[in-house]
Amino acid sequence: MLKEGYKQYAKRIAKIRSLSSPQINKISDSDEYANVLRDNFRKIGEIASENRDYLDENLFPILNRLGPLTDDEIERLEEFASLLIDPVTVEYLDISVMSMITDRLFKDASEKNDIDYTIRVLDYEVTSNYTMMNLTRRLEAVSDMTENYRKKGFSAGTKLLGYLNKTEFVKLSDKSKDIVLTNSRYICALYEGMTSTSEINARNINVLLRSLSLCEDAFYKENAPKYDWKYHYFRTLEYLCNVTENYNIRGFTEEQLELVADYSELFYDLWNSDKKYYGKCSGKNQVELSFYRNRYLSNRLRVDEYQGKLLDIYYERDVSNYNISGIYSNVLTPLEYIRTLDENEITEEQKAILLMFYQDIINYAFRTGNDTTVGYVLEYISQVLLNFIELPGGITFEEMCISCMAAMHPPTYIHSVMVGNFSRCITTHLLRHHPECFIGMMGVRHRDDVKEQRNDIIDYAYHCGLCHDFGKLMLLDTIFTYGRRLFDFEFDVIKIHPNIGAWLLSHSSLSKRYAVGARGHHRWFDESRGYPYDYERIGVREQIIVDIITVADCLDAATDTVGRSYSRGKTFDEFLAELRSGFGTQFNPTIVKLFDDEKLLQDIRYLLEQGRSTQYKNTYRMLSDVQVKAKILKIKKK
């Protein structure tokens, strides 16, 4: 029964992901879309409650119990862990639960003298810590957390590599030998995103070269005859060729780049020597991308030649392919092209190519939906955002971010638009009643200056509200799709999103002015509570706008009954009571008093009743338009 229960838990998590982003092609109109979302999130609430109860009753008692695990418990926990993550694609259903299970198994294995069990658990440790590392790597504000996962992964991986000692290796079962040999290459994934030095990069290369050398060592081939050595050799070469991904962001030296380029030539020739076999391992575009990148980085290709090769790969892409090969050609290839550009010397042709890339990536993200590869899509899209080049008259950084949010998690997008609209409305009425509140911002020195800056202030408030949750972009594929009540450490991650949003917005010269709204909107007026803890109101010229966003954010979160709440939302009157109870503590008292104004209340009620409905209709149109375009592209391709 417990084994079946674990399977049902995994199925329910997958169901939650599916429900959070319903398939547009199965919905007839915008009204049905809003109704589907409302029903889906009600179902998510029910499923999430069932899942958390299941964990409380069946998993946590085992994890928290002192003493060694029984054989039956070990078997069940291992099966549960395997259900929650795919070690090949490193896509996961519930990495937090997976990580808890792995830590408990690791603790148990450390106390037992069972080599096969220890090796299995070490393998889980490497995989789960790599996945947690990869998630938090997007969150620059929590680099300590990332490095902790990386350190734990390396510790487990190093222990696994210790079993390559020939005296130890011969004692292992076939399955354990497979795990150890596989990790001889896979451990290098833990170097991704590392603050590298030439020594660390050399260590990375040497580990892979050692893994390659195993294929030529008669001892290992004789003692692991069932192991797929052909696949191992190819995959290890691929790891080596991809260490320079994202325009050599890790900073390999010229000598190291020459070495990697030499192996890229070998990798390219190997793939072409048996396309039938190796084509099942990696797509043509993946092989060509690493091959041409390494030729360029080693000065074997001019920049214009490299850009031409990247465009060739891009134009041959399949826009409906969401496996790793498809993500490489649809998102990573544009990223590599963007990294070759000097934004001060971009030609008109390159500007047109950039705009094409941005629009295509947005469309690709919209078609991602609830596909299981959403984590990988987001990983590379986040890098595109961090390397975004703003072009006059083109897609702005703000538009790129909000479009990706709409594509990958419509409820969070709609929330952002609603907060923008509420912020604009509240600002408009506050300007009417208390223009002095805006003195000190945007060049306003006196009350008389407010009239001249009125429209600019209102526009600023809207965009600040629209951008306030951009930090959640980096989290959309994980805890926002679990549906269940968050664990404490997950909430700690959520609380970092204001800093992440501010950091993300600072990458754009046009959008960095909105960073203060992203960073400060969860900090209480009296600074007694909220986060981030080091945010200080004093000296922030735009603080009145931040206070407005705080109210707008709470207003939408409390009253949304469609796409965000897993239970019944509050009425507007219930929110007003909540707002007044936070007078002078959570909320700015001047803004709270403003809600006594009947004209403001009338406008807010309109936005609640009609504005939100309009946003769901607009979102449906966006999503359905992209689906129609996708169908047209497929027809043309045929």
Image (cartoon, rainbow, N blue to C red):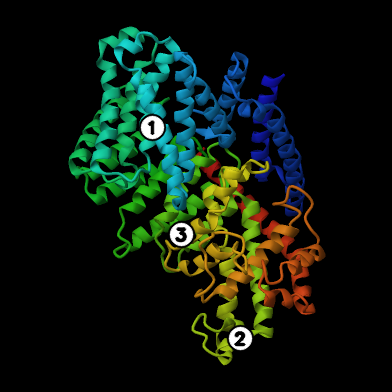
Q: Please tell me which residue is depicted at 59% across the width and 17% down the height of the picture.
A: 75
| Secondary element type, mark 1 | helix
State the mark number for residue 436.
2
Of callouts 2 and 1, the N-terminal one: 1
Q: Is 252 placed left or right of 590 in the picture? A: left
Measured as percent of width and height from the top left, residue 297 is found at 24, 44
Cα gap from disc 2 to disc 1, whole angstroms: 57 Å
| Local crowd size for mark 1, using a 10 Å CA cut-off: few (<14), some (14–19), many (≥20) | many
Q: Compare residues 464 and 545 and report the one nearer the observer.
A: 545
Q: Is residue 227 above or below residue 209?
A: above
| Secondary element type, mark 3 | helix
Of callouts 1 and 3, the N-terminal one: 1
State the mark number for residue 154.
1
State the mark number for residue 277.
none
- Residue 317 visible, this orientation: no
| Local crowd size for mark 2, using a 10 Å CA cut-off: few (<14), some (14–19), many (≥20) | some
Farthest residue in the bottom direction?
448
Type of amino acid at the residue the image marks with label 2: Glu
Of callouts 2 and 3, the N-terminal one: 2
Farthest residue in the front direction?
66
- Residue 242 visible, this orientation: yes
Measured as percent of width and height from the top left, residue 45 is found at 74, 43
State the mark number for residue 503.
3
Quarter residue 261 falls in: top left
Q: Are marks 2 and 3 in contact (CB under 8 Å)?
A: no
Cα gap from disc 2 to disc 3, whole angstroms: 30 Å
Type of amino acid at the residue the image marks with label 1: Phe
Q: Please tell me which residue is depicted at 24% across the width and 31% down the height of the picture.
A: 263
Quarter residue 82 falls in: top right
